[in-house]
Image: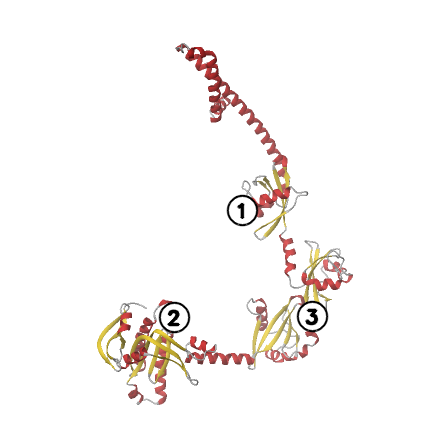
Amino acid sequence: MVDIRSWLYQSTRPAVVQRALLTSLVVGSILVLINRGGALIGTGLTTGDLVPIGLTYAVPYLVSTVSSVAAGRSQTRTLEAEHEASDRTIESLSRVPGQNPNPVLRMTRAGRLVYANESSAPLRAALGIEVGSDLPADLVAELLEAATQTPPRAVERSAGIRTFSWLPIDVPELDLVNLYGTDITAEKVVERFPGRNPNPVMRMSYDGRLIYANEASEPLVRTLGVEPGDPLPAEIADRRHDWLAGRGQEPFELQGDGRWYAIVPVPVPEFEFINLYGTDVTARKAVDRFPDRNPNPVLRVSRGGILTYANPASEPIRRALEVEVGAPLPTAFFGRVEAAMGSESSDILEVSIDERVFELLVVSLYEFESINLYGTEVTAAREVAAANRENERLLLNILPPSIADRLRHGEEVIADRFDEMTVLFVDCVGFTELSSHLTPTALVELLNDVFSLFDRLVDRYELEKIKTIGDAYMVVGGLTPDPDGRSHVARVADLALDMLDEVQSYRTRTGTRLEVRIGAHLGPTVAGVIGLKKFIYDVWGDAVNTASRMESHGVSGRIQVSAPMYERLAKTFEFEPRGVVEIKGKGPMETYFLTGRNGPL
């Protein structure tokens, strides 16, 4: 029954049906023309002719269907047998690679991975491939090309931080390519690093031959009279037995082209060679010859923190640390030395002794298990730097930073025009009467207290204090670009409101009967530095005069502003119209009192 169902299923396949219909149509039509051609042309067909004609078409259809199904089943059995044999072959081939400690993979010539042993897991993970997936097209092309060479060429490919060598072996009878991998990451690192080392690096084989020398080792190679492949001199080669046994690996010295090098042997048993790392110690040897003549402090410390050498110039440092040669450095100080060695930002320590300042450069000599400390007294440099900082502070108390910077760069005449600047004046009301009741010291302290409050507010709103004239205080906005896009006009308005609040708080806190009057205006100005001695940065123009008149014609405890300033701030601040005021030198002017903000800052 199963076989009949299979036959019926295959007979309904589109390819079988199409072939049977075509055969039936062609063969049936030919037979009908042969057997019934006369009737078709002459008397015509009768009802009795329909059945024979139907059979004439049906028989070729059945014959074609049966032959097609039979041929298909035969071909399927042949393919199944071939696949079974191929699977047995692949299974047989796969038994050994599974036990291989190195990566073994198998791919089709189209690049599909069909087998991978367990050892290839890291490689597959790095490349993001698994059995059944396709290898990268460029890798497949390179592997196929390498497999055609005699002998096959190894292909190197990096996966993450690891590097693998792939040896492709073509298996044409199975249309497959075996890939035998070897992790050569360590070998690559060993090969790559010495070439970039600025110090000499040579490599000696176990039989005493030079097998590698980087560019920095050329003076040594030239002096030794060897090239890669040549035996090294006996004085070096004969030591290899001790080195391989873990003995006598302390540094030894070689001379090349007039320079001295300390050589450290490091056996690398994984690759059966010995690396010889060199360090130029010419300068150290010269210093060792004449250490007492160095005018600057020089100290040498062991890895364990023992002071092993100190020249006479280091006496102040040794006295401050209370240490002599042969004794351990104080734990805290040696901790700073170790921290400096591990720091990426600075390897310099600063030590203060009896009002003297020393900088100690920490130089680690790993090859000699020691740390050198080279001292330089920087007391005078520190005093100059402190004086410069104080000069800078004083200069910035007189001039805006941008103007001070221009003077430092050599500008002799500084004069700038500003199309718009906001100018504010504050004056202490009744100060003359108030000062008559105060001592000179108390008077100065009062002004200093109040003006210091104003200074902090000016800094908060990033404005510029220009000067104080007696009990008057002048501020401008617009000298520098507006920070965060907030206009200098609004910042001056905020400053004025906060000044009133600070004065009120000061009166409450101290009981002083102090009142202020504030006026502000905006317009074009000219600013510059005047004078050669006790010079100042000042601002001139009609805007300055008008702002001064807004203050002098104002009201105690209030902020009077001009119409242009009101129009600029009407949407964001609250105002009270004062009306038209006769202003000295200006005539009648519309003025307003600034009373508050429409919202938070």
Residue type marked 1: Gly
- The amino acid at mark 2 is Pro
Task: Please give left or right for residue 127 compared with residue 599 in the image.
Answer: right
Q: Nearer the viewer, residue 502 or 415?
A: 415
Quarter holding residue 116: top right
Query: Are the two marked residues, 2 and 3, in contact with CB atoms closer than 8 angstroms?
Result: no
In the rendered view, does 314 fall on the left or right side of 56? right
Q: Quadrant of the C terminus?
A: bottom left
Q: Amino acid at mark 3?
A: Thr
- From the viewer's side, name the closer residue of 124 and 258: 258
Q: Earlier in the sequence, mark 2 or mark 3?
A: 3
Q: Position of residue 443 (x, y in %)?
A: 34, 87
Frontmost of labels 1 and 3 is: 3
Residue 525 vs 126, above or below: the answer is below
Q: Are marks 1 and 3 in contact (CB under 8 Å)?
A: no
**To which residue does mark 2 refer?**
481
**Secondary structure beneath disc 1?**
loop
**Helix, strand or loop for disc 2:** loop
Task: List the residue tagged with mark 3.
Answer: 282
At a point 64% along the width and 77% down the height, the residue shown is 324
CA gap, disc 1 to disc 2? 55 Å
Residue 511 visible: no
Task: Tell me the residue that label 1 is attached to.
Answer: 128
Furthest residue in direction left, as rendered:
579
Answer few, some or many: residues within 10 Å of disc 2's Cα (few below 14, many 20 plus, some between 14 and 19): few
> Which coloring applies here?
secondary structure
Helix, strand or loop at disc 3?
A: helix
Q: Comparing marks 2 and 3, which lies closer to the viewer?
A: 2
| Disc 3 crowd, CA 10 A, few/some/many (<14, 14-19, 20+) | some
For the residues labelled 2 and 3, the Cα–Cα distance comes to 58 Å
